[in-house]
Image: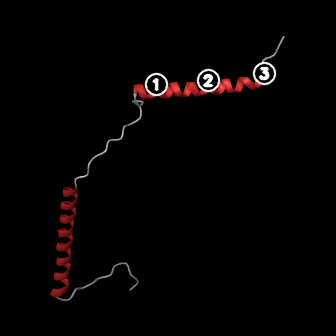
Amino acid sequence: MKRKNPTRRFPRMGRCALWTIAALTILRVWFGASPVLPTARAQIPDSGKQRLSILKEAQLTNKLLADIKGLLERGTLNVRVEGADN
Protein backbone atom coordinates (compact mmCIF):
# COMPACT_ATOMS: atom_id res chain seq x y z
CA MET A 1 0.00 0.00 0.00
CA LYS A 2 1.42 3.33 -1.05
CA ARG A 3 1.33 6.22 1.46
CA LYS A 4 0.44 9.72 0.38
CA ASN A 5 3.15 12.32 0.55
CA PRO A 6 2.49 14.41 3.72
CA THR A 7 4.14 17.49 2.22
CA ARG A 8 1.36 17.75 -0.42
CA ARG A 9 -1.33 17.90 2.28
CA PHE A 10 -0.25 21.28 3.72
CA PRO A 11 -0.52 23.29 0.47
CA ARG A 12 -3.96 21.78 -0.08
CA MET A 13 -5.00 22.82 3.46
CA GLY A 14 -3.60 26.30 2.85
CA ARG A 15 -5.58 26.69 -0.36
CA CYS A 16 -8.71 25.47 1.42
CA ALA A 17 -8.18 28.02 4.22
CA LEU A 18 -7.64 30.84 1.71
CA TRP A 19 -10.79 29.91 -0.23
CA THR A 20 -12.77 29.81 3.02
CA ILE A 21 -11.53 33.25 4.05
CA ALA A 22 -12.27 34.61 0.57
CA ALA A 23 -15.80 33.15 0.64
CA LEU A 24 -16.48 34.62 4.09
CA THR A 25 -15.18 38.01 2.95
CA ILE A 26 -17.40 37.95 -0.13
CA LEU A 27 -20.42 37.01 2.00
CA ARG A 28 -19.72 39.83 4.43
CA VAL A 29 -19.39 42.37 1.62
CA TRP A 30 -22.53 41.05 -0.05
CA PHE A 31 -24.73 41.13 3.08
CA GLY A 32 -23.19 44.23 4.65
CA ALA A 33 -21.77 44.89 8.07
CA SER A 34 -23.02 43.14 11.15
CA PRO A 35 -26.02 44.92 12.73
CA VAL A 36 -24.39 44.54 16.14
CA LEU A 37 -21.65 47.02 15.27
CA PRO A 38 -22.61 50.71 15.28
CA THR A 39 -22.05 52.62 12.08
CA ALA A 40 -20.15 55.87 12.01
CA ARG A 41 -22.08 58.86 10.79
CA ALA A 42 -20.09 61.92 9.82
CA GLN A 43 -21.59 65.30 10.58
CA ILE A 44 -20.61 68.47 8.84
CA PRO A 45 -19.65 71.03 11.50
CA ASP A 46 -21.55 74.31 11.45
CA SER A 47 -18.70 76.82 11.48
CA GLY A 48 -21.05 79.81 11.71
CA LYS A 49 -22.67 78.41 14.85
CA GLN A 50 -19.24 77.69 16.36
CA ARG A 51 -18.05 81.25 15.68
CA LEU A 52 -21.23 82.71 17.14
CA SER A 53 -20.75 80.63 20.30
CA ILE A 54 -17.13 81.80 20.62
CA LEU A 55 -18.24 85.42 20.09
CA LYS A 56 -20.89 85.16 22.83
CA GLU A 57 -18.36 83.66 25.26
CA ALA A 58 -15.85 86.42 24.45
CA GLN A 59 -18.52 89.08 25.07
CA LEU A 60 -19.39 87.48 28.43
CA THR A 61 -15.71 87.38 29.39
CA ASN A 62 -15.28 91.04 28.41
CA LYS A 63 -18.31 92.01 30.52
CA LEU A 64 -16.97 90.16 33.56
CA LEU A 65 -13.54 91.75 33.14
CA ALA A 66 -15.16 95.19 32.85
CA ASP A 67 -17.06 94.54 36.11
CA ILE A 68 -13.82 93.56 37.86
CA LYS A 69 -12.05 96.61 36.46
CA GLY A 70 -14.89 98.83 37.70
CA LEU A 71 -14.63 97.36 41.21
CA LEU A 72 -10.90 97.94 41.29
CA GLU A 73 -11.15 101.54 40.00
CA ARG A 74 -13.89 102.61 42.43
CA GLY A 75 -11.86 102.43 45.56
CA THR A 76 -10.36 100.33 48.27
CA LEU A 77 -11.29 96.71 48.68
CA ASN A 78 -11.49 95.06 52.07
CA VAL A 79 -10.03 91.55 51.97
CA ARG A 80 -10.78 89.09 54.74
CA VAL A 81 -8.81 85.89 54.94
CA GLU A 82 -10.59 83.03 56.66
CA GLY A 83 -8.97 79.92 57.94
CA ALA A 84 -5.48 81.43 58.07
CA ASP A 85 -3.27 81.41 61.16
CA ASN A 86 -4.01 84.77 62.81
* Position of residue 11 in the picture relative to residue 48 (left or right): right
Of the residues tagged 2 and 3, which is closer to the observer?
3
x and y, in percent, of residue 11 in the image: 68, 27
Dot 3 or dot 1, earlier in sequence = 3
Return the residue at label 1: 27
Instruction: Using the image, determine if residue 52 lies above or below residue 80.
Output: above
x and y, in percent, of residue 60 in the image: 18, 68
Question: Which residue is drawn at the image coordinates 27% and 84% (left, top)?
Answer: 79
Amino acid carrying label 3: it is Asn
Return the residue at label 2: 16
Element assignment for label 3: loop
Label 2 CA crowd tier, 10 Å (few <14, some 14–19, many 20+): few
x and y, in percent, of residue 9 in the image: 72, 23
Task: Look at the image and tell me in which quarter the C terminus lies.
Answer: bottom left
Amino acid carrying label 2: it is Cys
Dot 2 or dot 3, earlier in sequence = 3
Dot 1 or dot 2, earlier in sequence = 2
Quadrant for residue 71, please give it.
bottom left
For the residue pair 41 and 24, the one nearer the viewer reads as 24
Mark 2 touching mark 3, by CB under 8 A? no
Task: Look at the image and tell me in which quarter the N terminus lies.
Answer: top right
Distance from Cα at disc 3 to Cα at disc 1: 34 Å
For the residue pair 39 and 5, the one nearer the viewer reads as 5
Of the residues tagged 3 and 1, which is closer to the observer?
3
Amino acid carrying label 1: it is Leu
x and y, in percent, of residue 57 in the image: 21, 65
* Position of residue 28 in the picture relative to residue 16 (left or right): left
For the residue pair 39 and 80, the one nearer the viewer reads as 39
Label 3 CA crowd tier, 10 Å (few <14, some 14–19, many 20+): few
Return the residue at label 3: 5
